Image: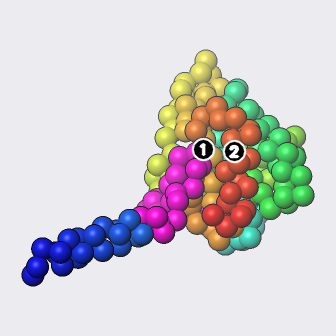
Amino acid sequence: MPKFARRLVVTLACLSAACLVACSPAKPAFKSFDLTGANYALGFELTDHLGQRRNLNDFKGRVVMLFFGYTQCPDACPTAMFQLAELKRELGAQGDQLQGLFITLDPERDTPEMLKAYLDNFDPSFVALVPTAQELEVVATHYKAYRKKVAGPTPTSYTLDHLAGFYIYDPKGRLRLFSRPNMATADLRTDVQLLLQGI
């Protein structure tokens, strides 16, 4: 092959590669950890605080933010639920497209009535999920949700060290993000709005 022809082939190959790179969609600039394509935390089948069996499909069409916690948590849980309620308010008309879910890590003490009263303090649209002890083992393992009981002065005054952050699903029910601890509400709002745009 003549030298000029070889140069032409190389030039065309480089231009084609550059075009492919330029035409590739840019990765979304999420503030949370991007879990798109992860093979865990893909869903659940649990009873809610009203006695109804629920799964992720029940909430399609909305961005779902799921948190593991317990009602007697002294700090991380109420802080997270307050932030979620604040986020929903800040979204304005889009707030109806945000669903908060709370899976209790403490079904021994967290009755459905307690959970309803707890979430009503933040937003009555939030849904609590109440696993049995066996279901909790399964769902916590699938979600890689760390939890450890810390003994208190009495057998029923224990606390739980646990994972603190939201698993975030897009309106199609796909796992997309995990929020960093202590994220700013404005950053969470940006992420939710990107997901609502179909990104």
Q: Residues within 10 Å of mark 1 (few under 14, many from 20)?
A: some
Magenta span: 21-45
What residue is drawn where x is 69% and y is 41%?
A: 187
Per the image, label 2 sits on a secondary structure element best described as helix
Residue assigned mark 1:
31
Indicate whether residue 137 is drawn in magenta: no
Quarter of the rendering occupied by the N terminus: bottom left
What residue is drawn where x is 46% and y is 52%?
A: 141
In the rendered structure, which amino acid carries the disc numbered 1?
Lys
Separation (CA) of disc 2 from disc 1: 7 Å
Question: Residue 127, how many percent across, how many down?
Answer: 77, 55
Question: Residue 65, how many percent across, how many down?
Answer: 68, 53
Question: Residue 140, how many percent across, how many down?
Answer: 51, 51
Q: Does residue 55 appear anywhere in the picture?
A: no
Residue assigned mark 2:
188
Q: Quadrant of residue 32?
A: top right
What residue is drawn where x is 89% and y is 52%?
A: 92
Per the image, label 1 sits on a secondary structure element best described as loop
Residue toward you, 14 or 180: 14
Q: Quadrant of residue 95?
A: bottom right
Q: Residues within 10 Å of mark 2 (few under 14, many from 20)?
A: many
Q: Earlier in the sequence, mark 2 or mark 1?
A: 1
Cβ–Cβ under 8 Å for marks 2 and 1: yes
Indicate whether residue 43 is drawn in magenta: yes
In the rendered structure, which amino acid carries the disc numbered 2?
Leu
**Position of residue 101 in the picture relative to residue 23 (left or right):** right
Picture layout, residue 97 above or below residue 110: below
Question: Residue 184, how many percent across, how many down?
Answer: 70, 35
